[in-house]
Amino acid sequence: MRPPFTALHVVQPGDGGVARVVTDVVAAHVAHGMRVAVACPPGTPLAAAVRARGAEVYPWRAGRDPGPGALAEARRVAELVDLVRPDLVHAHSAKAGLAARLAVRGRVPTVYQPHAWSFEAVDGVTGLLARSWERWAAARWTDRVVCVSDAERRRGEQAGVRAAWTVVHNGVDTRRFGAFTAGADRAAARAELLPDVAADAPVVVCVGRLCRQKGQDVLLRAWPAVAARLPEARLVLVGDGPSAEALRGAAPPSAVFAGAVADAAPWYRAADLAVLPSRWEGMALAPLEAMACGRPVLLTDVDGARESLPPGHAAHCLVPPGDTGALAGALVRLLQRPILRQSLGRQAHRHVVTRFDVRRAGAALADLYREVAPGPCERREPITQ
């Protein structure tokens, strides 16, 4: 009997959106008979989630940023490749992409998915080094680069990355996030999560890692202008991260920090509006989740934002990144127009169900795997470092 196709995912720590993407894709692939292994930091929610969905889980202790331990991290990936003997290695995000490609060096078909380019996060010499590495690794040790938006692909091309490209938009589990039920659904979630907030108070939710990329500092600087116009409005930041302490210190009284949560869906359902003021993205997952729950979203015009929105929503739901005035103005306009919000939410729900279901993304990746690595391989020589 022919053995099942085996994919090894290598995932760096600390990125909740990527973890949710990997978890959903793993579940879809296991359900279709694929053997899936995941290398990730032990004891993390990702490790527990993919194990529960049928994946083999292998400990890979790694930091988020390049450093003196990078070679040791790459050697561990090489050990896992020799142990799992996958037909294909799929590396997610910059650090895992660095370690996996250093480990494999083209000996096993390799897919790299940046989930936003590393060179967008850094300037100066570090940014030049990141661009140089991405060009080198894509040309020599990457069989396919998977981008989550056409904008992310164009960003890579503009940076000089020459690769075989495939665009697979992010997807969410639309069945889990459920149908749009604005009234009772919102009221129940609000009563459970925000019992001290008035039932008719406008609530804005921002779900994301608390870090510079996600732009919560911009949101907090914009919020006083919103509160001046709508004193009863509340802002909820859901997530944790390296900027948590600084953001709490800068937060106005009407901002609430919910911390890290296992499931953000109840917070979307409690909200009137979801916002994500990112400085850069590939295609953010949180807005897709919010729209799947029937909530309108307000986004900064970074990579993937326009592609994720329904037709006609950009006029209401996009602002320039870093522009606190535009962000505050858009928040006030949307919060003051409940009928518009409800219409945008219904359209958003239909849009995500039609175009961004995770099962479509999983099927597209499975097709890509078999294109890159047509059949189970018999790799006879171990990878040496």
Image (cartoon, rainbow, N blue to C red):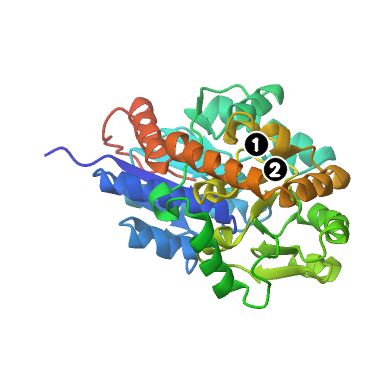
In the image, taking residue 365 as reference, residue 186 lies left or right, namely right
Q: Residue at x 34, y 62 (%)?
A: 52
Q: Residue at x 78, y 34 (%)?
A: 128
The numbered dot on residue 318 is none
Relative height, residue 305 to residue 164 (above, below): below
Relative height, residue 31 to residue 183 (above, below): above
Disc 2 target residue: 299
Residue 155, quarter of the rendered image: top right
Question: Which secondary structure, mark 2?
Answer: strand
Name the quarter where the N terminus is drawn: top left
The numbered dot on residue 305 is 1
Between residue 297 and residue 81, name the one nearer to us: 297
Disc 2 residue type (three-letter)? Leu
Image position, residue 196 (x, y; %): 67, 78
Image position, residue 43 (x, y; %): 48, 69
Between residue 305 and residue 145, name the one nearer to us: 305
Residue 93 can be seen, yes or no: yes
Residue 354, quarter of the rendered image: top left
Label 2, label 1: how far apart the Cα atoms are = 7 Å
Residue 103 can be seen, yes or no: no
Image position, residue 279 (x, y; %): 75, 44
Question: Which secondary structure, mark 1?
Answer: helix
Q: Mark 2–mark 1 contact, CB under 8 Å?
A: yes
Disc 1 residue type (three-letter)? Ala
Image position, residue 140 (x, y; %): 54, 27
| Disc nearer the start of the sequence (2/1) | 2
Residue 72, quarter of the rendered image: bottom right
Give the farthest residue toward the front: 339
